[in-house]
Amino acid sequence: MSNLGIGTDEWVAQHEERSASQSPLKKLFARIPLWAKWGSFFVIAFLFGMFSDNQYLLRVGVNLALFIMLSYGLNIVVGYAGILDLGYVAFYGFGAYGYALLSSEQLGQHWPTYITVPFITILTALLGYLISLPSRRLFGDYLAIVTLFFGQVFVQLVLASDNITFPWADDYVDITAGSNGIPGLDTFNLFGFIFDDIKDYYWLLMVIVLILTIAIHRVSATRIGRAWRTVREDALVSEVMGVSVNRVKTIAFVAGATIAGFAGTIFAGMQTSVFINGFDLPLMIMIYAAVILGGSGSLAGALIGAIIMTILPELLRVPNYGAILFFVALLLTFFVLSKKFSRFLIYVVSIILIGFAFQLAMTAIGVTQANAEDWVVGFTGDLLKNWLFVPENRILWGNFAFILLLTFIAFFSIAKPIWKQVLLPFIGFTAIFLWEVRLIADVSTTRQLIIGAMLVVLMILRPQGLFGQTRVEIL
Amino acid sequence: MASSALALTGLVAIATPAKAVTCTGTIAIMAPLTGGAAFIGKEQAGFAKVAIDAVNAKSGSTFDFKELDTQLDAAVASSLAPSVVSDKKIIGVVGPAGSQEVLAIGGLFGANDIALVSPSATRTNLTAGTYPSFFRPIGNDAVQAPTGARYMVQTLKAREVVVIEEKTAYGTGLANEMMAELKKLGVKATKLVVNEKNADYAAVVTRVPKTADFVYVTFQVAAKSESVAQELIKQKKKAVVFGSDGSDSPTFKTPGTFLTAFAPDVSNLPAAKAAFDAFKVKTGAAAATTFGPPTYVAAQVIAEAAVRVCEAGKTADRASVLAEIKKTNIKKSILGKAIRFTATGDVIGGTFPVFKTQKDGTRKTVG
Amino acid sequence: MDYLGQQLVNGLTLGGVYALIALGYTLVYGVLQILNFAHGDVYMIGAFLGFFAMTWLGGPLAPTVPVALMLLVMFLVAMMGTGLLGIVIERFAYRPLRNSTRIAPLISALGVSILLQNGALLIFSPSIRSYDTSSYIPSTSGFSIGQVTIDSVRLGVLVLSAVLMVLLTRWVNGTQVGRAMRAIAYDKDAAVMMGIDVDKVIRWTFFVGAALAGAAGVMNGLLLRGVSGTMGLIPGLKGFTAAVIGGIGSVPGAMLGGLLLGVIESLAQGYLSTNFADTITFILLITFMLFKPNGILGRPMMVKV
């Protein structure tokens, strides 16, 4: 039976109950002043920039800042104004390629940075405006798909524009270098200061992110911000109330495009090369995931979402961190599911017993065991190597365990509570087995699996995102 | 008393020779381990691992292996590059797999004396001298395309060729070289450009004129070349498919087709057989395509260079390994040929024999 | 004229495959108003299941049963398998989100898509498998009308997709479950009040939609041979495009949209520069959408105030 929404009066009456039931942690969090919450992030960022020289971490910081900019922009379009723009990443690519064409040997142009960046940013804004014009006639999913088409047109056009044959010319014209990409771009050069170190870009971006945060926060409280929110909730009503919906949507669209274009130019300058396959759907998906995980419509959400989607994949590159994450998540899940501490202990003990039983069973059947050095990666393997029996043919057993785990989880969800309790330790053991036997060796694929699982689980647990507001449907 | 103690120490010093020098270090691979090109990266990683294990077993070294997933994306590669530079244990890198990735990180690695030995980046201008630490044990586009073109025109007497360029860094480079060479040989050549994500080749094949003798394909996925070959038969065109090393896989088996590859079919050579078997056991894969064996050689080059450094009594670090790689001289690699590098990083004698597919799907060297 | 005919045949075959994928999108959208982005990966799993069924029956070079039977088994296994997969996805990724915003299932679907792709990578390994169709269905078989050749595989795909579409229309219009599905698509709350078991109907919808995608996967394998873990992204996109052009939520619309998309693509590649074919296709589609914002057969969305 699907749940029907609740009536207006009842929702209003439940208000007291709702605010009383807020957990103490949430109340405490709400009492911290806004500037302190934001300030902590920026203080950490600035301190890091001042004291660290680790090139890799600085690069991650630069990636993070660019991603935050993109999340902010998409948040304005999707979160504030409610426009499902699936081609947003094309503005980023346009900004990057625009910069590339004016700062490389491709067209032989080397414009000074202080002209190129504003010029391309304004051009991107113009492009955003042009695209928003025909989109006015479309709503919802149809708008989504047209913006998707625009995004694809950009990618295909860039790919194809290295081979433009005019009927009158004998040879072809190469404008965008197609799939080869454009390397060797000039780095930023602002009034004599050359950005030749990654740290220069780091500082530039952190300052820009700070300014953007304040700016968007301010705008969000003005008339246009409120107009965005009413249009998102109900466009028809806002039109009736006197808000020019088309104009408001256009402004949001253009604002998002401008931020993306600006970020694109900085990206191109920093990487000193552009390749088209980085401006396609995979990146678009990541930005959407960041905005929605954080809670669309919330600036803080966009920031947190961006942090999760940038830092987490990097952390997961290292098997040890991945292992920590996995085991912590596993233990947490069990802890939450057991409700009582005594039950939690029972689960842990059962898992350990199953492990030993498994060892005995395997040796009895005569399955060859793999050498410890072969499969131990990271410290968790070291801890468990005497308890866990790892067969020689890891791939076969790993696949089997994967399918078994999925079957267990499937049964778990439809089983009666008593059976749920029995299944849980088996699920735990199979998960650990799978992790040590297969997943930890295949770090790259596991990384992606964890990201995918995280998206599904987070959405189910908190569909409105971390900082989003629960939307209530009132009949 | 003191003198005898001294003598004893001296004796001990002479008796235990400082020969068993342990050679350690990490060899990293940058390849697409996930994403659309994962089939390339996984195979490369598998073969690299097998090579390093083989060198470890033979010379008692203890090299580690580190996998870095770039998804064939230059942005990801350039993001990972600083982490490689700052990880001082890494003494050399196998890869990156894509030519555009080399463009993105070659400068940084050259400045830090980290060797890049790529088994699959074939863009010609990578060895124009811009990247002093870049090597490749395979021939580049400027050798492969003309070889194919000359064989088509001079031996097979082709008069009209259609080139299908797939819009990837690999395909575009190869297609351009092929068109240039065909023009030089005075043959009628037309180019059809297709997207990498193209769904169906029927429409493109319909465009191939009935008078065309050959269709040169620049795919890296052999199934696509096979698709085109079969489509040509289905649509009753006389053109025959001529592929590049990207089509070198058992999947491409229409009889009568040709291809150029950097080595004869190596899986039958005894030395190569051991590598193939080890690869199959380690990864559970049923067969290998064209990307594996060069990666074996690439890893071998780095590992053996490091071993040579250790045998000379020094510790294996980046600069010394790089210097040794320049002096690489493998007499018989699993690619069936010797491996020595030119001053700019190309392999000396990187030729591309031409193969013709027989009725049973195997290939025979014809040129 | 022959050239046009050939390109039309190419386009219709391609379009048939797109239509089957588009149908899955449209069916799910009709009942749940969500865009199932994991659909393309269901199609991919279908292609793999068909491949494994073929290998189990002896493989392309030495089938142990007659070819026709092997093909039948491949399709059945793929369709049953993907149908079940569709039900599982609905149960775990969409059911908990039934009452939340429209955008949450989108991200959940993306998560499922990533899981399916990388799960396939892990279990099946990334090597590209080949259906090797020409070993058991020779490419010289088939017939020609004038200069236009239609080989057996292409013919089979055309016929099969037509058959499946007819069957689907009968199911949607004729059976009780199909009618219930249309009722839910029209007004979910009213359907509930009329006593329709929404959960069961949604399960059926996902099953049928996914099974169609599975069939499309096997067809693609037979046509193009290559099967890999990431092959679902682009066809999924194309199927989604086709569903929206036809009017999302409309079953005949999805079929029409699919066929139209296939034909446009083939004609663009056939007559215009192959280089710019994709760009032009998308520009055409954009222009089309601007003139017909609700798709070919879509109903204009009327919002009750």
Image (cartoon, coloured by chain):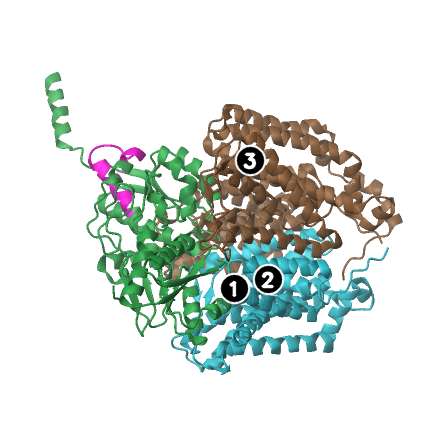
Chain colours: A brown, B green, C cyan
B36 in relation to A75, above or below: below
The residue marked by circle 1 belongs to what chain?
Answer: B
Residue at point 85%, 57% (across, down) = C304
Taking the view exactly as shown, the residue that stands out farthest to the top is B2
Classed neighbour count for the residue bearing mark 3: other residues with Cα under 10 Å, few (<14), some (14–19), many (≥20):
many
The residue marked by circle 3 belongs to what chain?
Answer: A
Disc nearest the viewer among 2 and 3: 3
Q: Which residue is mark 3?
A: A266
Report, in whole angstroms, how far the alpha carbon at label 2 lies from the one at label 3.
Answer: 33 Å
Q: Which residue is mark 2?
A: C238
Q: Is residue B226 magenta?
A: no
The amino acid type found where label 3 is placed reads Ile
> What type of secondary structure mainly makes up the magenta span?
helix
Rendered image quadrant of residue C164:
bottom right
Which quarter of the image is occupied by the N terminus of chain A?
Answer: bottom right
Q: Write the start and end of the magenta stretch as one range.
A: B300-321
The amino acid type found where label 1 is placed reads Ala
Q: Which residue is mark 1?
A: B199
Rendered image quadrant of residue B279:
bottom left
